[in-house]
Amino acid sequence: MHIKIEKKEFSETVHIAARFAERKSATLAALSSILIITGDDGIKLRATNLETGIDLKLSGEVVSEGVVAIPAVILQQIASSLTGEGKISLEHTGDIVTITSGTGKSSIKTVPYADFPSIPFPENPKNRIIVPGVLLKNLFTAIASCASNSTVRPELASIYLAIEGGVLTAVATDSFRLAEKKVPLSNSGTQGKFLIPAKNALEIAQALSDDEIIVSFDEHQCAFVSEKGMLVSRLTNAVYPDYRQIIPKESIVEAVVLRKDFESALKRSTIFSDTFQKIRISFDPKKNNFAFFAKNADIGESNETLPARVSGSALELSFNHRYLSAVLGLTQAESISLTAAGIGRPLIIRGMNDTSLLYLVSPMNQ
């Protein structure tokens, strides 16, 4: 195999592919490698860790065809060292691949490519939707942080995706807070639901292009296909809890506050939170204000009162401040609405005029 590729494109593509290679694989060296394939389809780079996989197209000149597997860490280090404009030459002979850039030359020992596993593609071609890549990236990046970090319950460490009535609904929860985001789709025929591990969704989000993405899925994996290539993730084989049961149907109080006021007051209050990261919020409909209170025996205390539009009954609840601040990454609305159903009941936060978001937080003991 012998190919010639622009330095910049080669470097960028290698860095993306390397994210999907197994970082520590003592049993199968091919999993820690990037596979380079040349043929009738041009030049492709592949990598997989059996959880996720990537198949990227790369433009360049194919002098001679072939297949080679190169350790991902080494190839990434070489790609990082490439500077300036121009092309590199990559030539494979025997068990050595030689990369030439200008006057420099590197010879790398290859890995047997026969051990490289195939990257499975969803079998049912009917289960597919088209979504702008930039929208999907933002969705995964925002909501994945609300999934559980523990794998004890794999369904809670996943993002639940449901397609129904021309709407894509994404949900993530760690049982302490829950985020639901809805995205309208241009194609309304497809229906289905699946669970993708949150860590896989984050990896995929970092590699997706901004262009339109075809999302295909079956019982075992989902694929994200664009003109630049394909990304694949295994799916979580579990049943997602019926999260709608925990969403209060009624509320006793609502406050509407400016996002910037909420953000700055919360930021100052967190300085005074205790070892449990607790902050108390209060609704005061008589004075028409909303307040944060935090107290730390070693530091002092803070009381932040915000002008708000408050309706309903007076109420105080305590929350982990990290869970309250997480909503700021889920909506860009200028004002946010906070509704509560009573003591011990979850708080629901929405962006005003943002019907795509529902964010729920469970309170702490007072």
Image (tube, rainbow, N blue to C red):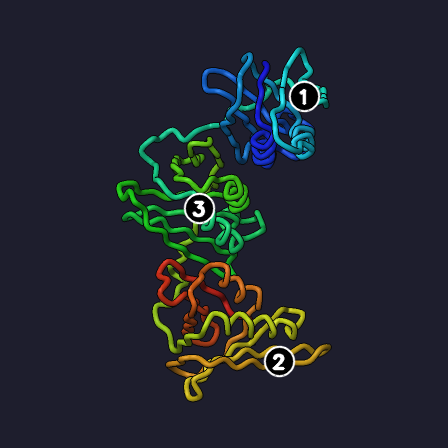
Q: Residue furthest front?
A: 85
Q: Which label lies toward us, 3 or 2?
A: 3
Q: Could you tell me how far apart the alpha carbons at marks 3 and 2 are, in whole angstroms? A: 39 Å
| Picture layout, residue 301 above or below residue 171 | below
For mark 2, give the secondary structure.
Answer: strand
Q: Where is residue 200 drawn, in percent x and y?
A: 53, 42
Specify few, some or many for label 2: CA neighbours under 10 Å numbering under 14, 14-19, or 20 or more: some
Chain-order first, disc 1 or disc 2: 1
Give the residue type at disc 2.
Answer: Ser
Chain-order first, disc 1 or disc 3: 1
Specify few, some or many for label 3: CA neighbours under 10 Å numbering under 14, 14-19, or 20 or more: some
For mark 3, give the secondary structure.
Answer: helix
Q: Residue at x 49, y 16 (%)?
A: 39
Specify few, some or many for label 1: CA neighbours under 10 Å numbering under 14, 14-19, or 20 or more: some
Horizontal arrangement in the rendering, residue 72 relative to residue 189 (left or right): right
Give the residue type at disc 3.
Answer: Val
Q: Which label lies toward us, 1 or 2?
A: 1
For mark 1, give the secondary structure.
Answer: strand
In the rendered image, which residue does mark 1 sit on?
100
Q: Residue at x 55, y 45 (%)?
A: 199
Q: Could you tell me how far apart the alpha carbons at marks 1 and 3 are, in whole angstroms? A: 35 Å
Quarter holding residue 300? bottom right
228 and 161: which one is in front? Answer: 228
User: Which label number is shown at residue 302?
Assistant: 2
In the rendered image, which residue does mark 3 sit on?
134
